[in-house]
Amino acid sequence: MPQFSYRARRRSGEMVQGVLEVADRSAALTQIERLGLFPVAVDAAKGGAAVATVEKPGNRREALAAMLPPTLRQALLRKRKPKLQELATFTQQLANLLQAGMPLTVALNSMTHLESKGISSEVSRQLRQEVMEGRSLSDAMAKQPLIFSDLYVNMVKAGEQSGALVDVLRRMADHFERFASVQAKFSSALVYPAFVAVVGIGIIIFFMTYMLPKFLTLFGNMEMQLPMMTQMLVQVSNVFTGYWWLMLMIVIAMYIIFKRFQATEEGKRKIDQWKMSAPVFGKVMKLNLYGQFARTLSTLLENGVPVLTALKITEQVLPNRVIKEAIAKTRDAVTDGKTLAQPLAQSRIFPQLMVDLVKIGEETGDVPAALKNVADTYENELNIALRVMTNMIEPVLIVVMAVGVGFLLLSVLSAMFSLISNVGGSMSR
């Protein structure tokens, strides 16, 4: 009978090696699981007596976590919610393993050895244990809400019910990658303006608190009348150097007031409303929200999630309170028997183009495709709006910084010219 060497992990975290005489690799996996072990690697062996040795696990942190209850284990190995790109990578890897023909438990076991940044191998171990105990993958993921959102769980459930789990996982991976791409574009659009602003403010503060006092000492020794521009700069510098603690307290107080206002529901709504109505930035924000709404709802409906559940999940996913309220009213209207396009139009939040395309989708019986078209449209417009915003912010910041630095230089130079003229006049006399 063929022999298979294996490496498996005990619940305590210890690694066990051994050799089994079984008919095939599948039987070897079954036998290892019956022993209460988690298979790590199973390979065909040419021969040798059955042995069982114990080795210390290489990852002390995971070995310690393996001895803890599931909740404490997750707290030790996971401290933050994974980023969208990390979730996309995890989802794509799982889809690839299942596509290759691996059973779900074997695929999850393999996931513990694949490098998936941001999601620890303990997550895959817990999922595998839950599945081995008879639960579905979606139910197992629902027990880890920090990692898998309602959107993720419901789409996996729909994939399990339809028998197209691999296709659903691939669509989800694409969905998360699209959202991660949009986030990256937002970040990259603000990096250069933020850098220019920080450098400019740093130069001004350094000049006002360090360089200017040295010049003022020189001018004070000459007992000369400073120009008006220099006197204004001196007053500002005195405020910076003499009352910096008061300015710091004012900034801290304003920050605390803002945070308390932001913590209230009314405050959150007001801030979200301001974001959507702000010049230039408001357009970018609305295009991003419209694209997120259409893409998320399209992905859910395309994978067989009921429309009311899909609207509820979409409402939870979107961060803007104004949009959330509009989606909630839309869900209530759909519950009462109305079509999706009617409440979207009545909310006066969503653009007419989206309403018209959704209405066409309802008439043709393909709302997911219509929403996907909407998402593509607004994502393309978002790319253009981001470029426009960046092209507008950069020159404005450069001009503002140039005016500030120029004022500093002119103030000092005018005082120096006055000093030179006074010295020249004294020498001529």
Image (spheres, rainbow, N blue to C red):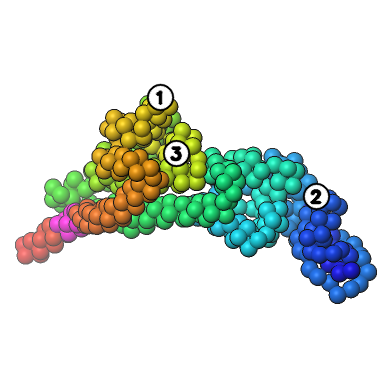
Residue extending furthest toward the left: 429
Q: Where is residue 320 shown, x and y percent of the image?
A: 38, 37
Residue at 33% over, 58% down: 192
Circle 1 SS class: loop
- Which residue bears the numbered disc 1? 336
Q: Give the range drawn in magenta.
A: 405-416
Q: Nearer the viewer, mark 3 or mark 2?
A: 3
Say few, some or many: other residues with alpha carbon within 10 Å of mark 2 (under 14 / 14 to 19 / 20 or more): some
- Main secondary structure of the magenta stretch: helix
Image position, residue 341 (x, y; %): 32, 35
Residue drawn 63% across the image and 58% down it: 98
Instruction: Give amino acid for label 2.
Output: Arg
Identity, as a three-letter code, of the amino acid under mark 1: Asp
Residue 394: x, y in percent? Answer: 26, 57
Q: Residue furthest right?
A: 49
Residue at the front extreme?
Answer: 364
- The residue wearing badge 3 is 314
Quadrant for residue 116, please give it: bottom right
Residue visible at 58% across and 57% down in the picture? 95
Spatial CA distance of label 3 from label 2 is 38 Å
Which residue is identified by label 2?
Answer: 11
Quarter that holds the N terminus: bottom right
For this rendering, which residue is in front, 133 or 381?
133
Residue 386 seen in the figure: no
